[in-house]
Amino acid sequence: KAGVTQTPRYLIKTRGQQVTLSCSPISGHRSVSWYQQTPGQGLQFLFEYFSETQRNKGNFPGRFSGRQFSNSRSEMNVSTLELGDSALYLCASRTSTGQDTQYFGPGTRLTVL
Amino acid sequence: QQQVKQSPQSLIVQKGGISIINCAYENTAFDYFPWYQQFPGKGPALLIAIRPDVSEKKEGRFTISFNKSAKQFSLHIMDSQPGDSATYFCAAFAAGNKLTFGGGTRVLVKP
């Protein structure tokens, strides 16, 4: 089975721009979660989607949003980028919200200049 | 509020030695405790996991010890190898909720 894939792998943007990141979960997995990883804050939960509905949300401003499509693929959008948004954005999938093992993708490295 | 505290932040161990990483949690609703291993440029990969009804779980050179009353759990890496050099994250999960990660431990195994 193919693993979780994320595109693009690297991205450079400037302050004020917006960005959209994509995640394709493992086949059969219906839950997708997004995390932000930075050296200072570690791994922080952004949100989780299951069957196109947001099920959980972390403590991030409204500039961070996401959605999930009927094929379980998910996108994450960050508007009005700030320097502090530079991070590795990780996507993880699992079979359902009640199943605990999450499998991570390689991440998208976002650099905001 | 950091619900899972992990220590140490980094450790150096000689090849063949034992690496020990400790985690403590506060939320008694947590019922699943995975450990993830992350290499530079890669996403975290599930290493081993334990549930609170088990006090110890071993998979190869990796062992989790769990102390429910103390709300602590630890990862032991036996016979550490240079290929084990990575960042290790403990995590905790409560049903219907999100995965909460510890701050991570950078392990360096010297040959």
Image: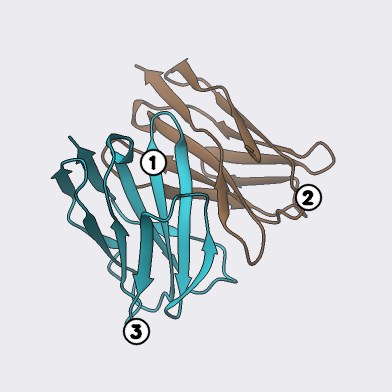
Chain colours: A cyan, B brown
Q: Which residue is mark 3?
A: A70
Mark 3 → mark 2, Cα distance in angstroms: 35 Å
Asked whether, in this view, residue B83 is left or right of residue A48, the answer is left
Q: Which mark is residue A37?
A: 1
For this rendering, which residue is in front, B93 or B22?
B93
- In the rendered view of the protein, which quadrant contains the N terminus of chain B? top right
Q: Secondary structure at mark 1?
A: strand
Q: Residue B64 placed where, x, y %? A: 63, 41
- In the rendered view of the protein, which quadrant contains the C terminus of chain B? top left
Q: Is residue A94 above or below residue B32?
A: below
Residue type pointed to by label 2: Thr
Q: How many marks?
A: 3
* Circles 3 and 2: CB atoms closer than 8 Å: no
Residue at 40% x, 21% y is: B109
Q: Residue B14 placed where, x, y %? A: 44, 15
Q: Mark 1 or mark 2, which is nearer to you?
A: 1
Q: Secondary structure at mark 2?
A: loop
| Mark closer to the chain start, 3 or 1 | 1
Q: Secondary structure at mark 3?
A: loop
Mark 1 → mark 2, Cα distance in angstroms: 25 Å
Answer with the quarter of the image where residue A82 lies: top left
Residue type pointed to by label 1: Gln
Asked whether, in this view, residue A98 is left or right of residue A39, the answer is right
Residue at 52% x, 53% y is: A58
Q: Which mark is residue B28?
A: 2
Residue at 85% x, 41% y is: B69
Answer with the quarter of the image where residue A104 lies: bottom left
